[in-house]
Image: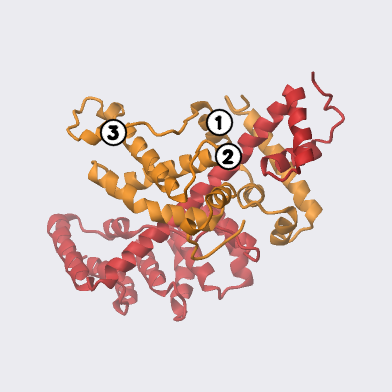
């Protein structure tokens, strides 16, 4: 995973920004996170929320944005449009929360409650499956968790993983295979885990 | 038409699917891969399963990363706030809170209550791994941030045995032990952590050491530890202890 300091993503070509997000580039993700949080926070605090809710909703929205970009569900042509998209998802999620069962008997005077749903999909079945697998990953040994992180999240090569774990490249490849097989077995033993 | 995958090496298959998912296939390989998916629903299903597994591995890690980002935002907000000359105001508010708390709770003041009100484990360090990062320290920090303090301590103790002067390590071992309801061990590590005057954790180490002593009901020593500290949180904690 590449790392950059002081990055200005408005100066990068849009395709490059999208590509960096898809590669889980820490610098670009951090920039997006830090730049957009204040606006979402202000919105949620202004609309009956608290700090913790602002953080939770924002992080959910950020992950939804990130996942949709990875799955090519976001189409735009300017980096700034990502900021608008993220805000729209956060706003939608917050308004959805306000409209949830807890609040359904409340009459809102705030006209902002009327909103257009942004173009992002929530696949509940897939979300459920991902949550189950995430639980299984948490139950893997530390070494396997690290291997999967280095390989899939940080996008390290086996050579780099071998250097970090102080093993040889073939062992890194074999270890990753075994970890993934272990994870597969774990997901097959949980209810609704293999479908 | 289904292709016969029986003779295929499962590890090579996994590598091939990874190469596809990570966008590492050449044009010709990609065309062959797509053809294979079209011909075999079994293979296509394996690709989907591995994709979901990869997405899960990514998501669990981006959650940790977002927590790190958020911690930085909070730290920045705090330092900006303090740099605007509001220390005096903060001190006044803290004193007001302390006095009000005393007025409200004077009948139930106890070391236990002050501990519960003031103990919040250090949020920990970022867990993005550099190529030279210490693997076991990193393991411990991941567990620490997930509140698996026993596992964190188990990862860090061997490192401490090899390098007992590492200030970061002794500090986090101290906080983890305190969070894990082991004030005796916490005291051992935090005493070491606050002795290193060069350490960036010195004020925090004093804070958690005072809380550790408080946990052991040793209020006078806790006050002595805090008495020379200038950090706002330590001043506030000392004030709370003086009211006991």
Point out the image quarter for the C terminus of chain A: top right
Tell me, yes or no, if residue B47 can be seen here: yes
**Residue at 52 percent of width and 48 percent of height:** B62
Residue B187 position (above or below residue A188): below
Q: Are marks 1 and 3 in contact (CB under 8 Å)?
A: no
Query: Could you tell me how many numbered marks the image carries?
Result: 3
In the figure, the shade used to draw chain B is red
Chain identity for the colour orange used in the image: A
Q: Position of residue B101 (x, y in %)?
A: 17, 58
Residue displayed at 33% across by 62% down: B77
State the image coordinates of residue A82 (x, y, percent, origin top left): 45, 46
The part of the image, by quadrant, that contains residue B26 is top right
Query: Which tag is nearer the camera, tag 1 or tag 3?
Result: 3
**The furthest residue to the left:** B103
Q: Chain of mark 1?
A: A
Residue identifier under label 3: A98
Give the residue pinned by disc 1.
Answer: A129
Q: Which comes before the other along the chain, label 1 or label 3?
A: 3
The N terminus of chain A - image quarter: bottom right
Label 3: chain letter: A
Question: Is disc 2 placed on a helix, strand or loop?
Answer: helix
* CA gap, disc 2 and disc 3: 28 Å
Q: Which mark is residue A9?
A: none
For the residues labelled 2 and 1, say whether their Cβ atoms are less than 8 Å apart: yes
Work out whether A75 lies above or below B114: above
Q: According to the image, label 2 marks what residue?
A: B56
């Amino acid at each position: 995973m590449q790392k950059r300091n002081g990055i200005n993503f408005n100066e990068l070509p849009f395709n490059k920004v999208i590509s960096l997000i898809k590669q889980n580039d820490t610098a670009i993700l951090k920039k997006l996170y830090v730049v957009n949080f204040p606006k979402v926070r202000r919105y949620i605090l202004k609309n009956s929320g608290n700090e913790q809710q602002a953080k939770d909703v924002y992080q959910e929205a950020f992950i939804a944005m990130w996942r949709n970009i990875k799955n090519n569900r976001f189409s735009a042509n300017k980096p700034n449009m990502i900021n608008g998209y993220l805000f729209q998802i956060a706003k939608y999620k917050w308004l959805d929360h306000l409209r949830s069962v807890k609040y359904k008997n409340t009459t809102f005077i705030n006209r902002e409650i009327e909103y257009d749903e942004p173009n992002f999909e929530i696949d509940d079945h897939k979300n459920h499956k991902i949550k189950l697998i995430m639980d299984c990953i948490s139950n893997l040994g530390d070494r396997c968790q690290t291997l999967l992180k280095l390989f899939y999240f940080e996008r390290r090569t086996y050579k780099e993983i071998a250097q970090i774990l102080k093993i040889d490249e073939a062992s890194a490849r074999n270890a990753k295979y075994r970890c993934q097989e272990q994870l597969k077995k774990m997901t097959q033993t949980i209810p609704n885990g293999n479908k | 038409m289904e292709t016969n995958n029986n003779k295929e090496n499962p590890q090579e298959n996994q590598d091939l699917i990874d190469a596809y998912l990570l966008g590492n296939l050449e044009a010709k390989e990609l065309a062959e891969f797509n053809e294979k998916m079209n011909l075999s629903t079994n293979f296509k299903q394996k690709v989907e399963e591995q994709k979901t597994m990869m997405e899960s591995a990514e998501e669990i890690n981006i959650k940790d990363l977002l927590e790190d980002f958020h911690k930085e935002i909070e730290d920045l907000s705090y330092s900006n706030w303090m740099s605007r000359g509001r220390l005096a105001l903060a001190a006044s508010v803290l004193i007001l809170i302390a006095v009000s708390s005393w007025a409200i709770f004077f009948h139930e003041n106890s070391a236990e209550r002050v501990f519960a009100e003031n103990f919040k484990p250090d949020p920990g360090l970022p867990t993005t791994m550099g190529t030279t990062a210490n693997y076991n320290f990193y393991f411990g920090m991941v567990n620490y941030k997930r509140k698996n303090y026993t596992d964190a301590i188990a990862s860090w103790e061997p490192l401490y045995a090899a390098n007992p002067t590492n200030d970061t390590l002794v500090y986090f071992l101290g906080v983890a032990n305190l969070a894990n309801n082991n004030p005796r061990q916490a005291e051992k590590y935090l005493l070491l952590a606050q002795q290193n005057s060069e350490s960036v954790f010195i004020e925090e180490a004093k804070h958690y050491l005072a809380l550790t002593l408080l946990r052991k009901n040793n209020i006078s020593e806790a006050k002595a530890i805090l008495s020379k500290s200038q950090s706002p949180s330590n001043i506030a904690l000392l004030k709370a202890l003086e009211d006991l």
